[in-house]
Image (cartoon, rainbow, N blue to C red):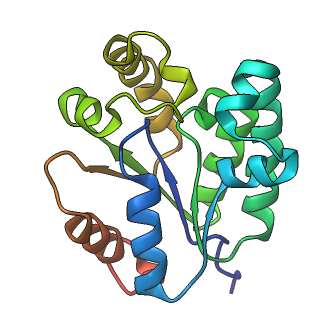
Amino acid sequence: MNAPAHPPVVLVGPPASGKTTVGTRLARELGVAFRDTDHDVEAETGTSVADLFVTAGEPHFRALEERAVARALAEHDGVLALGGGAVTSAPTRALLVEHGRAGGTVVWLDVDLSTAAKRVGLSRDRPILGVNPRQMLRRMLETRASMYGEVATLHLQTGGRSVAAVVADVVAAVPALGGAR
């Protein structure tokens, strides 16, 4: 019998879809660690993602993110959240598709524009949203949807739903977590 894929659950989705909030709660419920690749990049570089975008540029950040995702997929045994743009990397998408084929679950936490815009507000820690957050968010939701869909083994809407309900849906849908059989 194959060993279970690690991490058992990877969360992907646009900014403000709930990856950190849902991931933290899911990890606590499962009694496993939560890991966020944005935090991994920040720990490696000693600077925030927002500052990396400004000082080194998005391509540099994306290269760091690619390595962080590959490491986390290989090492982490808990719940893993990826930055919203991680799926823009073809090598990262390939790793996520393989992870799903190996028995891991890649959950696309999806969110509608209205909910995402309310959640984001004018947060300065979301550098990719730039000057017009609502327009940038709409563009991201539209252009990245096919990439999230490519890697996801489970697609859940988070807009207008409680964190507890989303976590319950993940647990119910994932055999390794005692869900769907």
Q: Is residue 82 left or right of residue 61?
A: left
The image quadrant of residue 90 is: top right
Q: Nearer the viewer, residue 129 or 160?
A: 129
Residue 157 horizontal/vertical position (percent): 24, 47
The image quadrant of residue 142 is: top left
* In the image, residue 21 above or below residue 109: below
* In the image, residue 82 above or below residue 9: above
Q: Nearer the viewer, residue 105 or 1?
A: 105
Q: Nearer the viewer, residue 156 or 22?
A: 22
* In the image, residue 75 above or below residue 81: below
Total numbered labels: 0
Residue 159 horizontal/vertical position (percent): 20, 45
Position of the C terminus by quadrant:
bottom left
The image quadrant of residue 170 is: bottom left
- Residue at point 65%, 38% (across, down): 93
Residue 20 horizontal/vertical position (percent): 47, 57
- Residue at point 67%, 77% (across, down): 77
Q: Is residue 132 left or right of residue 10?
A: left
Q: Nearer the viewer, residue 147 or 22?
A: 22
Q: Is residue 61 left or right of residue 157?
A: right
Q: Residue furthest left?
A: 160
- Residue at point 83%, 47% (across, down): 46
Residue 133 horizontal/vertical position (percent): 38, 18
- Residue at point 68%, 87% (across, down): 1
